[in-house]
Amino acid sequence: EIDTDFKLHASTKRHRLLHPLLLEDGSIITQSDSPLIRFNCKSELMWQSDLHYHHSNELDKDNNVVVSSKKYNSKLQKEFGTENFFIEDLIHMVDIKNGNIIYTKSIFDILRENDLYFLLDTEIYMEIDSRPWDVLHTNDLQPVLYDTNFFKKGDIFISARHISTVFLYRPSTNKIIWYSQGPWR
């Protein structure tokens, strides 16, 4: 179960600085399965975005933070037939100036809208891990910062640990440009 007692876990006295993103002005953007928080170089809170963020924090081409979050989703819980709860993974772009979310997209919706929902085959997944409530588990989002023949500035590489898959997603067109599943774990 996701513990969302942010007042307890995200206070300045208790917050663990995981996946810190150091900015040019000396401020840090961080989270630890908690709200996304920006501290200035004097450790004073500049802003806090109260979702359940996790894993990497990266700057995109427009100097926004690209970060993933997770939330309970009862509709997906019924769809996947889990007993207690189900975690949905989301992508966010957050304005570094004020912590406002300027873009959000469910990775489940991305897969469904790109006819790749079959990658969520829970029977295969259950053979290697017994957490049917956390099918994707987004570990990393890497924004593309320059154009090449294979990807464009603004694309995002997405790593989904529990289905051993890496995607190249283009938010501007809502298309998965490329993906590879396994043989890694």
Image: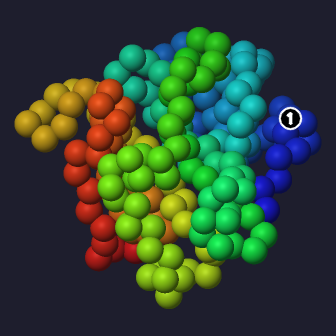
Position of residue 89 in the picture relative to residue 113 (left or right)? right
Give the position of the N terminus as an image quadrant: bottom right
Q: Position of residue 111 (x, y in %)?
A: 40, 53
Which amino acid is tagged 1?
A: Ser
* Count of numbered labels shown in the rendering: 1
Q: Nearer the viewer, residue 40 or 110?
A: 110
Label 1 CA crowd tier, 10 Å (few <14, some 14–19, many 20+) = few
Q: Position of residue 108 (x, y in %)?
A: 49, 52
Check the image and report above or below for 49 versus 167: above
Position of residue 16 in the picture relative to residue 99 (left or right)? right
What's the residue at 48%, 33% (across, down)? Answer: 66
Q: Position of residue 62 (x, y in %)?
A: 39, 17
In the picture as drawn, the residue positioned furthest to the bottom comes out as 127
What's the residue at 60%, 23% (across, down)? Answer: 101
In the picture as drawn, the residue positioned furthest to the left comes out as 149
Give the position of the C terminus as an image quadrant: bottom left
Q: Is residue 98 visible?
A: yes
Q: How is the image coloured?
A: rainbow
What's the residue at 67%, 56% (across, down)? Answer: 75
What's the residue at 33%, 55% (across, down)? Answer: 115
Identify the residue position indicated by label 1 in the image.
11
Secondary structure of the residue carrying tag 1 is: loop
Q: Nearer the viewer, residue 105 or 3?
A: 105
Q: Is residue 128 visible?
A: no
